[in-house]
Image: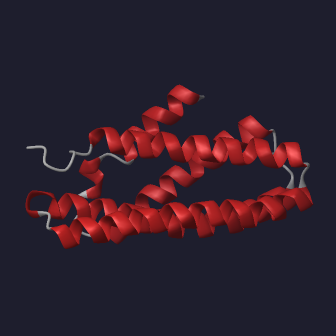
Amino acid sequence: MKTRFILIAALLLSPAFLHAQSIDDEITLIQSAFGMEKRALIEEYMGYDRNAQFWNVYNNYETERRSIIRERIKTINEYLEKFDKLSDSDADAITKSIIRNNAEIAALHRKYHKQFNKVVSPIETAKFLQLDSYIQNTILLAISESLPFIGEK
């Protein structure tokens, strides 16, 4: 399961995809394709194929998470576009955007921790949030590994 996920994440979220002419369209395409695969992974790992209450909360969570991640991808795209001529103000704005994005993800986890606990046990909630964090961290690592460092030629 991990290998399949890593391969999909690396292919779908490589910088080549992030240089699309219409970044919003590209993000929507990626999130749509990946969203179906992510749900299948969660169904397999969590064993929730018919738990309607869990999936209702999950769908709301995913909608909010996608909005936050969309901003992260736009920030990464901005970094790639400005990389060759990155100014102090550009670097500062990008850094602040990433910090804000990280805080938004943490706030989302806090918010939905309570909601998931209402429909599944705290152990199941922790299991889901652990899996979701793993997925997000794997994607961010794949992206980070392919991004040039500031000052790198």
Q: Quadrant of the N terminus?
A: top right
Among the 4 quarters of the image, the one containing residue 117: bottom right
Left or right of 50? Residue 130 is left
State the residue at coordinates (38%, 68%): 96
Among the 4 quarters of the image, the one containing residue 21: bottom left
Q: Quadrant of the C terminus?
A: top left
Looking at the picture, the colour scheme in use is secondary structure
Q: Is residue 116 visible?
A: yes
Picture layout, residue 73 above or below residue 135: below
Q: Is residue 49 visible?
A: no
Q: Position of residue 141 (x, y in %)?
A: 42, 40
State the residue at coordinates (89%, 52%): 120
Q: Position of residue 41 (x, y in %)?
A: 65, 40
Q: Between 9 and 40, which is closer to the camera in this rendering?
A: 9
Q: Position of residue 26 (x, y in %)?
A: 35, 62
Left or right of 1? Residue 12 is left
Left or right of 92? Residue 33 is right
Q: Position of residue 70 (x, y in %)?
A: 44, 66
State the residue at coordinates (64%, 47%): 132
Query: How many badges with numbers are in the image?
Result: 0
Picture layout, residue 142 above or below residue 89: above
